[in-house]
Image: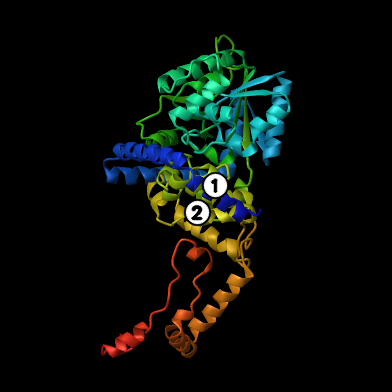
């Protein structure tokens, strides 16, 4: 089964899952409402969006020197920096750190980059126990599923489904559908893991080059426990997360939390600059940062596609996407779903492996309107669509022209020739209107859900001429 067929199958499965669609519809309506309430003044919102855009754009332009500065400051602070070009390298580095620390168990905070590398699976294959500490991540770990959303990984499940899942994996606990009770059950189970884990792994929201500070945004306190309770803390992030100054953080944090969950600010904002110092009573003895490229440098080469890397992973584009709301995240079959996934994944994986994703977009523009850092997502998606079928495009995107179909290309070349020749076009128009009934009823995917369009009996020019208008009108 090729990528197009596999994608269609996942879409069909999602559209026939009424419970899944109901779960998403309910969740997305609430999130969008909360976000709207945080931005009552559109003038202030646009000013904040422009400020956030400028901060991220500046960091991307200066990225090479900022990464050098970040490594220098982190090293001065006592944090060990590791550079990984590929997911395999990142996983091997983390495993090496764990082996060096004689770590057998890991408590893990939320990290989308670790989903890119499939870190959990890799560590478990090497006899390292991994427990997700974020409630949503813990739920999908029990279900053996990938995240369905970059902010709320278990958003596709309702309380009844979670209750049954907990009952299956923790039969000693009484069955309940009460959200507070389920949360307390998870908290009780995870507390022991925090205390016993040999190492903690986390993601990074922003890395400040000026001070060598790793910033983590969270709501549950699990991130803070994952990074401070174990004796070793390993952070993993993409190289695009670097920002220049500490003063860049407040505007980004302000618009990130409001865009992601509709909160004025998250419950916790962690700033990590060093391991435990002599005389301090808590904190890890060692802190490591793994900086992953995984195609990001390749994306940065293109002046237009570079905008993709401005993303701060708030999920606002996903929440407002009418396609995502109908399908959910798993239908995309990639780490990053929704509009940001349509822009990022074909570049990261190649158009030959993920180019079909770009068809899951109505180009309604909602994602571009809500993006807090003003990424022109519809424009980027449209460009990737074109490059997926145009093998002559001068581009750095991997797999260009992979979805090109010779039959379609021939039809469009004939149409181009016909449309450029006035006499031939008029002759074609005359024939089409006179013999319109011969138009086939099946015209590929278009007529799967629609009735085939039949040409009118008279062209617009003929009708205008009958009404007394000239062809030039």
Q: Which image quarter holds the C terminus?
A: bottom left
Relative to 400, is 209 above or below? above
Residue 198's x, y, as percent? 65, 17
Relative to 390, is 187 above or below? above
What color scheme is it?
A: rainbow
Residue 430: mark in rendering:
none
Relative to 224, is 43 above or below? below
Which residue shows up at 59% across the image and 72% down it? 409
- Regarding mark 1 in the picture, which secondary structure is present there? helix
Closer-to-camera residue (373/457): 457
Which residue shows up at 34% across the image and 87% down it? 462
- Regarding mark 2 in the picture, which secondary structure is present there? loop
Tell how many labels.
2
Residue 55's x, y, as percent? 45, 43
Q: What residue did someone put label 1 on?
A: 332
Q: What residue did someone put label 2 on?
A: 360
Answer with mark 1 or mark 2, whichever residue precedes in sequence. 1
Closer-to-camera residue (176/63): 176
State the image quarter where residue 278 is shown. Answer: top right
Classed neighbour count for the residue bearing mark 2: other residues with Cα under 10 Å, few (<14), some (14–19), many (≥20)? some
Instruction: Determine whether label 1 and label 2 are within 8 Å by CB.
Output: yes
Q: CA distance from mark 1 to mark 2?
A: 9 Å
Residue 54's x, y, as percent? 43, 46
């Amino acid at each position: 089964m090729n990528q197009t067929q596999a994608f269609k199958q996942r879409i069909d499965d999602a559209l026939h899952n009424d419970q899944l669609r109901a779960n998403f519809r309910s969740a997305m309506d609430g999130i969008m409402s909360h976000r709207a309430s945080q931005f009552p003044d559109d003038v202030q919102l646009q000013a904040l969006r422009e400020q956030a855009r400028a901060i991220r754009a500046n960091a991307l332009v200066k990225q090479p020197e900022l990464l050098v500065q970040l490594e220098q400051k982190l090293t001065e602070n006592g944090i060990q920096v590791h550079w990984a070009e590929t997911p395999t390298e990142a996983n091997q580095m983390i495993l090496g750190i764990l082996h060096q620390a004689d770590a057998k168990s890991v408590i893990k905070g939320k990290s989308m980059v670790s989903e890119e590398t499939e870190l959990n699976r890799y560590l478990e294959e090497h006899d390292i126990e991994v427990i997700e500490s974020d409630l949503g991540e813990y739920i999908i770990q029990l279900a053996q599923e990938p995240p369905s959303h970059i902010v709320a990984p278990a958003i596709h499940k309702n309380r009844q489904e979670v209750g049954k899942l907990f009952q299956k994996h923790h039969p000693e606990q009484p069955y309940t559908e009460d959200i507070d009770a389920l949360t307390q059950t998870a908290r009780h189970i995870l507390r022991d893991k925090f205390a016993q884990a040999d190492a903690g792994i986390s993601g990074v929201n922003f890395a400040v080059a000026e001070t060598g500070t790793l910033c983590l945004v969270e709501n549950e306190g699990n991130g803070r426990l994952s990074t401070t309770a174990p004796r070793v803390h390993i952070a993993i992030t993409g190289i695009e997360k670097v920002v220049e100054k500490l003063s860049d953080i407040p505007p980004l944090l302000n618009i990130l939390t409001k865009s992601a969950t509709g909160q004025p600010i998250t419950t916790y904002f962690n700033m990590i600059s060093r391991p435990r110092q002599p005389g301090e009573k808590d904190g890890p003895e060692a802190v490591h940062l793994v900086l992953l490229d995984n195609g990001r440098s390749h994306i940065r080469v293109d002046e237009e596609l570079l905008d993709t890397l401005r993303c701060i992973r708030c999920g606002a584009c996903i929440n407002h996407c009418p396609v995502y709301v109908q399908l959910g995240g798993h239908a995309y079959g990639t780490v990053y779903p929704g509009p940001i996934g349509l822009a990022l994944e074909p570049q990261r994986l190649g158009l030959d492996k993920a180019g079909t994703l770009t068809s899951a977009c109505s180009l309604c523009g909602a994602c571009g309107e809500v993006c807090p850092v003003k990424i022109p997502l519809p424009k980027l998606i449209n460009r990737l669509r074109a490059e997926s079928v145009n093998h002559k495009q001068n581009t750095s995107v991997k797999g260009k022209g992979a979805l090109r179909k010779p039959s379609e290309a021939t039809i469009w070349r004939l149409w181009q020739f016909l449309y450029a020749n006035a006499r031939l076009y008029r002759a074609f128009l005359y024939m089409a209107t006179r013999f319109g009934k011969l138009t086939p009823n099946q015209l590929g995917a278009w007529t799967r859900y629609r009735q085939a369009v039949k040409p009118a009996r008279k062209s617009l020019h003929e009708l205008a001429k009958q009404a007394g208008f000239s062809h030039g009108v």
